[in-house]
Amino acid sequence: MPEGHSVHRLARQFSDCFAGQALAVSSPQGRFADGAAVLDGAVLEGARAHGKQLFLDFAGDRVLRSHLGLYGAWSFGGTEGFRGASSIGAPRRIGEREAHDDDAVAGPLRPPPPVGAVRVRLVGDEGWADLRGPAQCVLETRAEAEAARARLGPDPLDPLADPASFVAAVRRSRRPVGALLMDQAVVAGVGNIFRAESLFRRGIDPATPGRTLDDAVLLGLWTENVTLMRTGVRLGRIVTTDPADRPGVAEDQAWPEHAHLVYRRTGLPCRRCGAPVAGRELEGRALYWCPGCQG
Ligand SMILES: [Zn+2]
């Protein structure tokens, strides 16, 4: 499942490449036909992300709110002008994995026939975007979209976020901090990789009940997620190792073998202490940690 950094990159891609344009909106698959009819021809005023939710704000109090879930992805294509407008390097696809475009189409825009179950297709002046397999895709008013956003915890990628509400939510709970970090009502945008890596980097045992952690530790955990997620936005990939953890391997060469400290490293020696990395399930998701470093 894409974590918050991917959705922020999506918002940036939509802002760069489609904002200010009247978009042709359709639902080739048909499951969003009514919403598409309402949006067709409307000007996209802006795009924003909160956690894993993407908000596309159209003129006339219309918001397309979507969540990719486990299987969803946005794919993009367009002319050389479309590629040039993208500040994140014109990805072809942002979803579980991100792929980058090497061959933009020359000449006028000709979107290809939709392939597979395309829930929504947006076509602008220079490019198009297709949404497939989302967990959620709804048309809302601004007020409805804001109500949905208000149900989420603060987003570490929001420069105006208040970490105090994250700290308070964790300290109210007996649940393990490893579970609370994945609860989007506690903190929005953290997924399985940021969860494992931020707890490791702060030396926190994921099984620790939230209420037993003090404010300073939780503010540190928040700050760790801010740092790791900003790196994710910059690179388009989650790289959490420090240079000392991957001697001789540059940041942009770290993916995938040298990118993570404990995520999917069960049984391998910890990069910091050498103890075998542990893995188990917590609330249905795989959890990774180092018993040596996170005692
Ligand atoms: Zn260790």
Image (cartoon, helix red, strand yellow):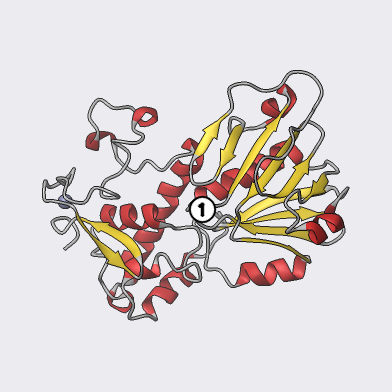
Picture residue at 86% right of the left edge, 50% below the top? 40
Seen in the picture, residue 260 relative to 144 is either above or below; the reply is above
Residue that badge 1 annotates: 4
Question: Is 69 rendered above or below residue 167?
Answer: above
Asked whether residue 82 is in view, the answer is yes
- 35 above or below 256? below
Q: Residue at x 50, y 56 (%)?
A: 70
In front of the other: 185 or 278: 278
Percent across and percent down for residue 250 are 33, 27
Q: Position of residue 291 (x, y in %)?
A: 15, 59
Q: Nearer the viewer, residue 101 or 55?
A: 101
Q: Position of residue 124 (x, y in %)?
A: 80, 38
Asked where in the image residue 76 lies, by quadrant, the reply is top right
Taking the image as drawn, is residue 216 in sight?
A: no
Mark 1 residue element: helix
* Farthest residue, direction top: 106
Residue 183, horizontal then vertical, whole percent: 45, 69
Q: Residues within 10 Å of mark 1 (few under 14, many from 20)?
A: many
Count the numbered circles shown. Answer: 1
Q: Amino acid at mark 1?
A: Gly
Residue at the (29%, 36%) spot, across then down: 258
| Quadrant assignment, res 216 | bottom left
Does the Cβ of the disc 1 residue fall within 8 Å of ligand 1? no
